[in-house]
Image (spheres, helix red, strand yellow):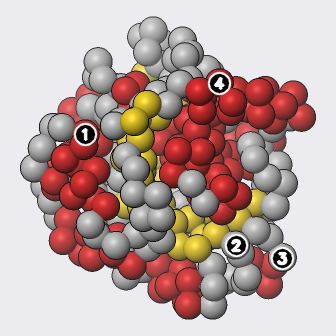
């Protein structure tokens, strides 16, 4: 049985790097990025995800290179792999106005995504009793959300990275309700702060801490993250690990995967946030996902203590 299961999309990205360079055909999506963040801390990680059979060799090799179990990867002959463009503002948040120029036509992309989402991912036997199921989703009633609820009833920790539409608020209320069901919730700063109605991190965290999960971690890009857990009832500012970022794509997803493993291993918001911060650091130093190696994991263990020493009470 696998301990940690990550559910999220596979997307092939065109990315505008922070130095202005544009790169193409890069494996992206929350599924692989979240799985990478978890795999940094455990060799018992599986991914539940979808793509077409049209996915090129380079992205396939990148996915295999993060060394997670791929039995939950479903490929369709009749649906193309999703594609997107990723460009960033000065705060390293996506700018959809620029991104749209390189994406597939919006209606066609949405129709393809709905078709993929309508197809259930069979749960492999080795995925049926995880310690943690981590969902990266904007759809609280899709099949995998229901599977995660059942796994929680069977004893798994339910971790949620809620993808909330903070521009149109099309799924705000239902994602807030789903967050109340989870054990771990890690929203991004734009949605978390706007829902809380404040730009003050402590006020934002107090709002989210009242929703019911055991662990809250709000991801705030280059500012780091803020964490809290119900047992210790202390708010923390987790500073980012110092790095010259090349590409922020997937940093939050990687953080969420690391956070979920950290919570299971430590049951402490401060330490869990440090796991997440190191996972994010390990992703942003290059574009595309790094190959998982013993050296990378050893470096992560060394960075964990220094990350913990830099934490501040909020």
Residue on which the image places disc 2: 131
Query: In the figure, is residue 197 to the left or right of 28?
Result: left
Foreground label between 4 and 2: 4
User: Which of the 4 image quarters holds residue 122?
Assistant: bottom right
Structural crowding at the residue carrying mark 3, measured as other residues with C-alpha within 10 Å and reported as few (<14), some (14–19) or many (≥20): some
Residue 290 location (% of width, % of height): 72, 31
Q: Position of residue 193 (x, y in %)?
A: 20, 46
| Residue 102 makes an appearance in the image | no
Relative height, residue 208 to residue 102 (above, below): below
Q: Are marks 3 and 4 in contact (CB under 8 Å)?
A: no
Residues 197 and 265: in front is 265
Secondary structure beneath label 2: loop
* Residue 309 shows up from this direction: yes
Q: Which residue is mark 1?
A: 201
| Residue that numbered label 4 is attached to | 306
Sequence order check: which comes first, mark 3 or mark 1? Answer: 3
**Residue 7 appears at what percent x and percent y?**
57, 65
Q: Earlier in the sequence, mark 3 or mark 4?
A: 3
Residue that mark 3 sits on: 1
Q: Earlier in the sequence, mark 1 or mark 4?
A: 1
Q: Residue at x 24, y 43 (%)?
A: 202
């Amino acid at each position: 049985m696998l301990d940690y299961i990550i559910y999220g999309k596979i997307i092939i990205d065109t990315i505008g790097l922070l130095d202005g360079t544009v790169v193409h055909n890069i494996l992206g999506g929350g599924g692989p990025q979240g799985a990478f963040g978890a795999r940094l801390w455990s060799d018992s990680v599986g991914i539940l995800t979808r793509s077409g059979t049209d996915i090129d060799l380079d992205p396939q090799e990148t996915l295999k290179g993060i060394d997670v179990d791929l039995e939950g990867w479903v490929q369709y002959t009749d649906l193309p792999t999703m594609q997107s463009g990723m460009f960033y503002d000065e705060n390293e948040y996506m700018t959809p106005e620029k991104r749209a120029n390189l994406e597939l036509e919006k209606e066609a992309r949405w129709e393809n995504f709905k078709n993929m989402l309508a197809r259930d991912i069979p749960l492999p036997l080795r995925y049926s009793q995880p310690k943690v199921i981590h969902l990266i989703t904007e759809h609280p009633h899709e099949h995998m959300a229901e599977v995660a609820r059942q796994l929680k009833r069977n004893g798994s920790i339910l971790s949620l990275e809620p993808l909330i539409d903070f521009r149109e608020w099309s799924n705000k209320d239902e994602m807030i309700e789903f967050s109340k069901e989870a054990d771990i919730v890690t929203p991004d700063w734009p949605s978390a702060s706007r829902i809380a109605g404040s730009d003050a991190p402590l006020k934002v965290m107090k709002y989210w801490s009242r929703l019911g999960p055991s662990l809250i971690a709000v991801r705030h890009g280059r500012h780091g993250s803020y964490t809290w857990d119900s047992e210790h009832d202390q708010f923390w500012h987790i500073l980012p690990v110092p790095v010259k970022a090349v590409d922020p794509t997937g940093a939050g997803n990687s953080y969420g995967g690391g956070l979920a493993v950290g919570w299971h291993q430590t049951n402490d918001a401060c330490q869990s946030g440090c796991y997440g911060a190191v996972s994010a650091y390990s992703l942003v130093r290059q574009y595309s996902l790094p190959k998982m190696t013993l050296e990378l994991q050893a470096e992560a263990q060394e960075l964990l203590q220094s990350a913990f020493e830099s934490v501040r009470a909020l």
